[in-house]
Image (cartoon, helix red, strand yellow):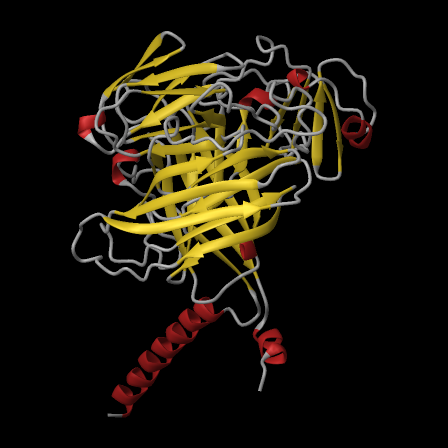
Amino acid sequence: MLAVAKIRLILYSILGLIIIFLIYQAVVPLGQITYSITPCDNSFFIQKLQPKERVSEVDKTGCTQKIIGEPVYFNLNTQRTFNQAAVTVTYQDSGQNNIIELGPQADEWKNYILRPLENKIIDGLNWNKISGNGAVLYQREKKFKTIEEFLNNLPPREEILAYKYDLPRREIMEDLPASCDTAHCAVPARSLTHKIPPLRGAYQFYTYLKNEPLDFSFSFSDLNLNKDADNIKVAIYYKDEQIAEKNLPDERGGEEERQRTDAGNIKLNMANLPEGFYKISVIANDDIITDKIISSQNIVSFINRIWLAENENKPIALYSDVPEATISTLNAASLQKINVNGDSLELAETYRQFSLPTRQSQSTLKLKTGDVILSGAGVFSFSEDAFYDPDYKKMVKTTDVDEEKINYIITSYSSQNEGEVSSPRPLDSWKTKTVSFDLTKAFRYKNNYNFIISVPGLIAEDGVDDWVEIKNIKVELKGSTIFDKFQNFQF
């Protein structure tokens, strides 16, 4: 009996230690912890890469897994919040993809804070390099000695490329529309609804004011396809600072009926605003359709991404400066051939992105019908008169710095192997890269931070043998200690 009691005591002690260890792993009383996983592991804290259609089967011999299509995601499950995360990935790749990026979800509308693990375009440069204040400047021919000198004496816009660095956007339009003069830029109220088709979900755009009020009217409807509240917010930004917002809470109900209903209107009318560019963000989920936009503003240029809603097979024309147009659809009825500067881009499958380099400062895209998502590093407008991009050109996976006559590249990315020729790497050429994030700016839902791994141009089932193979993902987290939390607790 004594021996049995000792065995039970040992077993209970082991079980107790396991429970204490698991509680420690979840609560993290000292505020710092590291989680690590290989593709062979099952972890409560770091989930496996998803979706399954974009990853290969796990190679159990080496405990590795290939990403064959992008993007892929993994959840970081934590029972408490953290302030910082350093994510280290050990990987190798086929050498055919120029850019690999990673980052956490930023908001509930699935925007992500992306940081580069690798950029082969920059890695292959043999240009002069200077660093400072979190920025790296590459110069084809050395002209500037410091980052500050460059920023204070910016060269012509067409010579500069930005990658993961926000240069100050143009504040004043030097080439104002013909209807403007030094005293007045207002035009008679006109409707842009005949040029802007219905849009789905969230979007943002630039507009420009000079001696005129900010004047926009939005009409919305609700598809009622999900059970969540379909709230709508419109926020106005000037010089990246929010100056106003209007909200339209979902008090309509009808989520169970799956019938489209009127969701109301939001009108913006703000006078005595300074001249310059303004950004307007419409924040809504994919249940919300913007049926009409009415405005008297000249410039309406949509930023990076728009989802054209269904529009009864009416043709749509857009103007854009994106260096590469990326198009997808969830609707089989919207499969079509899209005209991009006279070239044909076939949207041949649902739930798959198709891309085409434009290599022009301004491109024309013509679609036969809507319910299509368009994206790219630039802006989209529905008329040439409304088209204007105050931002600097961004680097994408197809960028050719020689062809585009770029002389300067400014970035927050610091190359770890400059001058290396981009070429397919031999197997077992593993690389380990670390990127850090401010988790206070990340979105957390049901105890999870959602991360994305993006490899632009990596498409599953495209017949190309390209991939990124993952060997290990490690996440180092830092946050408040349990003692800090007690000190800040309000009794």
Could one spot residue 106 in this view of the protein?
no
Q: Along the line of sight, which residue is nearer the eye, 103 or 312?
A: 312
* Image quadrant containing the N terminus: bottom left
Q: Is residue 361 depicted above or below 53 in this figure?
A: above
**Residue 88 located left or right of residue 318:** right
Residue 313 screen position, x and y as percent: 22, 24
Query: Picture quarter containing residue 126?
Result: top right
Q: Is residue 124 depicted above or below 415 in this figure?
A: above
Query: Picture quarter containing residue 252?
Result: bottom left
The residue furthest left is 257
Residue 328 screen position, x and y as percent: 31, 28
Could one spot residue 120 in this view of the protein?
yes
The residue furthest front is 188
Residue 350 screen position, x and y as percent: 23, 29
Q: Is residue 241 depicted above or below 427 in this figure?
A: below
Q: Along the line of sight, which residue is nearer the eye, 189 or 327?
A: 189
Q: Along the line of sight, which residue is nearer the eye, 216 or 60?
A: 216
Tally the numbered discs: 0
- Which residue is depicted at the point 61% across and 28% down? 390
**Residue 361 located left or right of residue 6:** right
* Image quadrant containing the C terminus: bottom right
The residue furthest bottom is 1
Query: Picture quarter containing residue 149?
Result: top right
Residue 398 screen position, x and y as percent: 48, 18
**Residue 349 located left or right of residue 276:** left
- Which residue is depicted at the point 41% across and 52% down? 108
- Which residue is depicted at the point 33% across and 85% down? 9
Q: Along the line of sight, which residue is nearer the eye, 65 or 376?
A: 376
- Which residue is depicted at the point 22% across and 23% down? 335
Q: Is residue 280 depicted above or below 262 in this figure?
A: above
